[in-house]
Image (tube, grey):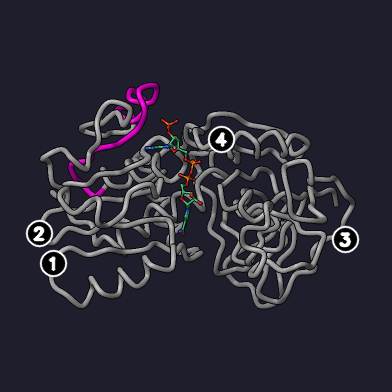
Amino acid sequence: MKAAVINKYGGAEVFQYADLAMPQIKTNELLVKVQASSINPIDWKIRKGMLQLLTGYNFPLVLGFDVSGEVVEVGDSVTRFKVGDQIYTRLDNITGGAYAEYAAVSEKAACLKPETMTHEEAAAVPLAALTALQALRDEGQIRRGQSILINGASGGVGSYAVQIAKAFVTEVTGVCSTKNIELVKSLGADRVIDYTQQDFTIAPTKYDIIFDVVGNQSFWSCQNSLQPNGVYITTQPYPGDFVQSFLTQIVPGKTAKVILLQTNGLDLASLKELIEAGKVRSIIEQTYPLSEIATAHRESEKGHVVGKLVITVAS
Ligand SMILES: NC(=O)c1ccc[n+]([C@@H]2O[C@H](COP(=O)([O-])OP(=O)(O)OC[C@H]3O[C@@H](n4cnc5c(N)ncnc54)[C@H](OP(=O)(O)O)[C@@H]3O)[C@@H](O)[C@H]2O)c1
């Protein structure tokens, strides 16, 4: 099969196109013909070698975590899927494997694709929307009527977070730059703060949950913006944040949390319900063929993608 691979860590120029052996599936796995994938910042962080202690030196590596595609083979113990099913998933291994014509997908990580979405729209969802859902629902314990601030509301995780927070019937404030104000409003945000004009951490408004998707604030810089029992959630798991998270959870009052995404087919099913109910949609800035994966990575690394960058894999 054709795949975009890296044979060493480095800049986007390290991508090469190779013919690889088809993935051999285990008894609990599906072989999926990948129709589309999408870019997440973790992809280029791995490509650059920022996680090499975890991702190792076993090249070639196929990167990419998001898959939307068709099941072409099932392992002997698979019961929930059959050949021909259209599924979407976030691959649950340490380096991914989605930038290829075929991927091995564990049954527990897979979910039938939302029927109202194309493969391109569905491929944008898994990693980013699972992060948003698990951050708000599990770490934030989001409840109806609360006041939520999403810092980085126009990006991959943030654009889903705004919509998911609205689906919980909350009051949502999105933080983005001037050019993205209308988009964030169109996602359902009740209020939008333009970070080029205003710093939300020094404004008097207080929130029940601050979800710092960008990770450019800290629990301490958000102190004055949190309600007495407010929760600060960050996507950036620096070692000190875990200590902070532990300490604030044993003392009553404001809490700091770190979101660490867990791949989970059941949560993808919850997202499918929200999508099919018309409550969540994908914002796609641009779609690239797999042959332009390096260009897509360079664009993502600039840090200003609106929604998601999608990769089409099947011709
Ligand atoms: N811990 C986990 O499990 C986990 C899971 C998923 C993602 N993450 C991490 O979360 C981060 C965000 O991921 P993502 O997919 O959302 O990234 P992304 O799509 O690349 O985010 C880009 C967005 O960030 C916005 N942005 C940039 N600077 C900003 C600022 N100062 N204030 C507010 N918004 C700003 C940009 O808006 P403008 O163009 O308007 O500036 C753009 O829309 C990444 O570091 C990623 O690795 C962690």
| SS under mark 1 | loop
Q: Name the residue under label 1.
A: 253
| Location of residue 234 with respect to 307 vertically, above or below | below
Q: Residue at x 29, y 28 (%)?
A: 194
x and y, in percent, of residue 111 in the image = 53, 58
Q: In which quarter of the image is the C terminus?
A: top right
Residue type, mark 4 in image: Lys
Residue type, mark 2 in image: Pro
- Give the mark, 2 or 1, whose residue is nearer the N terminus: 2
Label 2 crowd (10 A; few <14 / some 14-19 / many >=20): some
Q: Residue at x 62, y 58 (%)?
A: 50
| Location of residue 229 with respect to 33 vertically, above or below | below
Contact check, label 3 and label 1, Cβ < 8 Å = no
Q: Name the residue under label 4.
A: 302
- Rounded to the nearest whole Å, what is the CA distance between mark 4 and mark 3? 33 Å
Which callout, 3 or 1, points to the residue nearer the camera? Answer: 1
Label 4 crowd (10 A; few <14 / some 14-19 / many >=20): few
Q: Mark 2 points at which residue?
A: 228
Q: Which mark is residue 21?
A: 3
- Rounded to the nearest whole Å, what is the CA distance between mark 3 and mark 1? 54 Å
Figure quadrant of residue 110: bottom right
- Using the image as rendered, state which of residue 247 and residue 100 is in the foreground: 247
Figure quadrant of residue 107: bottom right
- Rounded to the nearest whole Å, what is the CA distance between mark 2 and mark 4? 36 Å
Contact check, label 2 and label 1, Cβ < 8 Å = yes
Tell me which segment is drawn in magenta.
168-186
| SS under mark 4 | loop
Q: Which residue is drawn at 46% across and 62% down?
A: 261
| SS under mark 3 | loop
